[in-house]
Amino acid sequence: MSVLEIRDLYVTVETDAGTTPILNGVTLTIRKGETHAIMGPNGSGKSTLAYTIAGHPKYNVVSGSITLDGEDVLEMEVDERARAGLFLAMQYPVEIPGVTVTNFLRTAKTAIDGEAPSIRTWTKDVKSAMQDLRMEPRFAQRNVNEGFSGGEKKRHEILQLELLKPQFAVLDETDSGLDVDALRIVSEGVNRAKEQTDLGLLLITHYTRILRYIHPDFVHVMVAGRIVEEGGPELADRLEDEGYDRFLADAAAGV
Ligand code: ADP
Ligand code: MG
Ligand code: MG
């Protein structure tokens, strides 16, 4: 049984004001097949956690650990993390001039699997995944992220998820900027990936609406770089009603 473990993680970033602590002791265990939602107000450190798992150089791990089946993820280069089975959408946020979606996906698949996929099945898989996500076939010939709308970026993210078949995925604000129809289509893609590969999923979101489509097994509330409350899906319902005010007041009071 595969497991991604985050232990007592402290992370800082360098800003003009000097070294700023962002994560202040985050502990989280995600097993394959489980869906964990991390929710919290803006600026609480959710994306910082995602970037740290992805290996973004701006984020310094001061102490604590991230391991995948006991292997030290923090020691791995970004591409090694992908080969180890981690999917981090924010690894590739940038435009890649001259690289089409279809070539990018094939290169990524080859790098992760250690061998090129057979052309016949690959072409079929890409076509069918794109159809499921209601993507125009010609999208495959566009350059990665060049002029992509918010919705196209999200669909491209989920297309990667479905084709690369990772063990664990971190999706940060996948719901942002999507209308209801797009949210449903993208969520269905995530749910297919969950079923097909028994994916372990860390779903980061500010709003509860995506959780109506992708059902979490566990919900964690992050405030001021700490997980301050944990529960099952019912916790998301409570947050929907109550918002984050109570947690913010506790954090301000140093509880
Ligand atoms: P969230 O995703 O929960 O909204 P973030 O992780 O983006 O929160 O940000 C948490 C805090 O860390 C914020 O105060 C933000 O300004 C700060 N922060 C995050 N990344 C950087 C960075 N690269 N440089 C400076 N400050 C950052
Ligand atoms: Mg499950
Ligand atoms: Mg964020």
Image: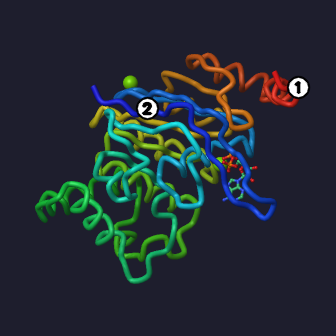
Q: Amino acid at mark 2?
A: Glu
Q: Which residue is mark 1?
A: 253
Helix, strand or loop under label 2: strand
Please say if the residues under marks 2 and 1 sit with CB atoms less than 8 Å apart. no
Q: Is residue 207 visible?
A: no
How many numbered dots are placed on residues in this image?
A: 2
Give the Cα separation between the discs numbered 2 and 1.
Answer: 30 Å
Residue 170's disc number: none
**Callout 2: 10 Å neighbours few (<14), some, many (20+)?**
many
From the top left corner, tell me how far across and down residue 146 is, in percent.
50, 76
Residue at position x 64%, y 19% from top? 235
Residue 139 horizontal/vertical position (percent):
40, 69
Disc number placed over residue 5 in the picture, else none: 2
Please indicate whether residue 248 sits to the left or right of residue 226 in the image: right
Find out if the beta carbon at label 2 lies less than 8 Å from the nearest ligand 2 atom.
no
Instruction: Give the image location of residue 212, x and y in percent.
Output: 56, 29
Q: Quadrant of the C terminus?
A: top right
**Is residue 123 in sight in this rendering?**
yes
Position in image of residue 3 (x %, y %): 35, 30
What residue lies at 69% left-to-right and 37% top-to-bottom? Answer: 225
Q: Quick one: 129 or 166, which is closer to the camera?
A: 166
Instruction: Look at the image and name its color scheme.
Output: rainbow
- The amino acid beneath tag 1 is Ala
Q: Residue at x 21, y 62 (%)?
A: 110
